[in-house]
Image: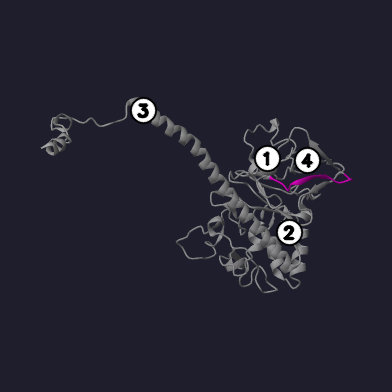
């Protein structure tokens, strides 16, 4: 009896657990929800810039890796032919180079000069510094007489055209079996005016600017190409009145760029260029722009009028070296501008964005800003 009482006393009471009891579920108040939302917003504000920074770094690293691969390919070119390729700013250097590596070359050299000539003579902007790498690295033909137009060469005969039907018409050879670098087709500006029509003398492979020289974009996100400069013509300036002036690259959507000088000044006050005995390859960084300042009195790039002054950026200080030529004597004066440091454009350029800082080169391990030394 006592045992039954003890057992019955352990049963839950109806008051505590009966059917008449209502449980209240826990929930968030409006204040608590606002606190949670605020915390999420703060965390997102911290995370989003970090994510974009990581993406930017990854894209810049990928571009630098491809630049390094291009440098390796140019070195292979030198090992194969015994000479570094020219950057096509000076025809005399171009001709010497091809006669050296192809002693038996015939009409192809004449053809090449014809393609690079306008009404004023040889024009070094027809194949500009952004188009050289594809020409030299897509490979030449194994035909020693016709390295450009032979099988596997950079040019391919389409047919005969002109009013008399006796002018050979060439296209960019879409196949490159002897290439020294694996180009990503998506970064080449190879095009056909009418893709739905067969290849003929009016419809053939060419570049987007209508000539037979391709550029290779620094990434699939920009049309600005990798740029190549040959050490023999870093500061080239022809005395001819038809000169395009100092060597450099310029396109309206990319801005101007010239070879970089070092912080070493020789005893005769001439510049010491980076990579003084080989070449420079320069990429615009992920912003697709090289910079603004190109010459003494303006921000436009290398062109016909760019014959008396030129600005070169100094690595790693980011200062600007300037060359001024006396038109009457041809004497060159070199100075360091005191209004430029850290690659920052001067106030006179009237530009806010500093596009130079993320440029990539084959003499720096990372972006210019990463190795900046004031």
Q: Which residue is tagged 3?
A: 32
- Tags 4 and 2 touching, CB below 8 Å: no
Q: Which one is earlier in the sequence, the residue at label 4 or at label 2?
A: 2
Residue 87, percent across and down? 71, 56
CA separation, marks 4 and 2? 24 Å
Per the rendered image, the range of residues in magenta is 257-268
Residue 63 as seen in the image, left or right of residue 374: left
Mark 4 burial class by Cα count in 10 Å: few <14, some 14-19, many 20+: many
Q: Is residue 358 a member of the stretch shown in magenta? A: no
Picture disc at residue 300: 1
Residue drawn where x is 57% and y is 52% of the image: 219
Q: Which residue is mark 4?
A: 321
Tell how many labels: 4
Q: Up-down: is 11 above or below 272?
A: above
Question: For the C terminus, which image quadrant?
Answer: top right
Q: Is residue 31 above or below residue 49?
A: above
Q: Are marks 2 and 3 in contact (CB under 8 Å)?
A: no
Q: For mark 3, does the 10 Å Cα neighbourhood hold few (<14), some (14 to 19), or many (20 or more) residues? A: few
Position of residue 68 measured from the top left corner of the image (x, y, whole percent): 65, 56
* Element assignment for label 4: strand
Within-10-Å neighbours for mark 2: few <14, some 14–19, many 20+:
many
Inter-mark Cα distance, 2 to 3: 69 Å
- Say the numbered circle drawn on residue 7: none
Q: What whole-number distance in Å separates the C-alpha atoms at marks 1 and 4?
A: 17 Å
């Amino acid at each position: 009896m006592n045992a039954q009482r003890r057992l019955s006393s352990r049963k839950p009471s109806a008051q505590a657990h009966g059917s008449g009891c209502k449980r209240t579920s826990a929930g968030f108040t409006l204040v608590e929800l606002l606190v949670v939302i605020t915390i999420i917003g703060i965390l997102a504000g911290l995370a989003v810039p970090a994510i974009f920074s990581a993406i930017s770094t990854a894209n810049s690293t990928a571009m630098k890796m491809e630049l390094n691969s291009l440098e390796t390919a140019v070195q292979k070119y030198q090992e194969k032919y015994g000479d570094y390729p020219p950057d096509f700013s000076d025809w005399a250097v171009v001709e010497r180079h091809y006669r050296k590596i192809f002693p038996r070359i015939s009409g192809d050299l004449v053809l090449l000069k014809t393609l690079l000539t306008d009404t004023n003579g040889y024009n070094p902007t027809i194949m500009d510094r952004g188009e050289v790498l594809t020409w030299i690295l897509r490979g030449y033909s194994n035909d020693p007489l016709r390295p450009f137009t032979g099988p596997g060469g950079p040019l391919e005969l389409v047919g005969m055209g002109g009013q008399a039907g006796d002018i050979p018409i060439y296209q960019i050879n879409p196949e490159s079996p002897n290439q020294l670098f694996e180009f990503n087709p998506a970064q080449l500006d190879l095009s056909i005016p009418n893709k739905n029509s067969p290849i003929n003398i009016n419809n053939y492979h060419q570049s987007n600017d209508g000539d037979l020289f391709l550029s290779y974009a620094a990434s699939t996100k920009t049309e600005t190409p990798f740029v190549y400069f040959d050490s023999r013509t870093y500061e080239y300036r022809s005395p001819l009145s038809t000169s395009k002036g100092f060597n450099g690259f310029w396109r309206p959507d990319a801005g101007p760029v010239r070879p970089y000088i070092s912080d070493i000044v020789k005893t005769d006050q001439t510049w010491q260029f980076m990579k003084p005995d080989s070449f420079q390859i320069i990429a615009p960084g992920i912003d697709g722009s090289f910079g603004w300042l190109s010459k003494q009195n303006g921000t436009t790039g290398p062109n016909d009028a760019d014959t008396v002054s030129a600005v070169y950026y100094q690595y790693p200080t980011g200062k600007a070296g300037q060359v001024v030529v006396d038109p009457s004597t041809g004497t060159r004066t070199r100075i360091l501008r005191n209004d430029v440091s850290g690659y920052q454009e001067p106030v006179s350029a009237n530009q806010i964005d500093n596009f130079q800082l993320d440029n990539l080169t084959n003499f720096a391990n990372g972006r210019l800003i990463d190795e900046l030394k004031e």
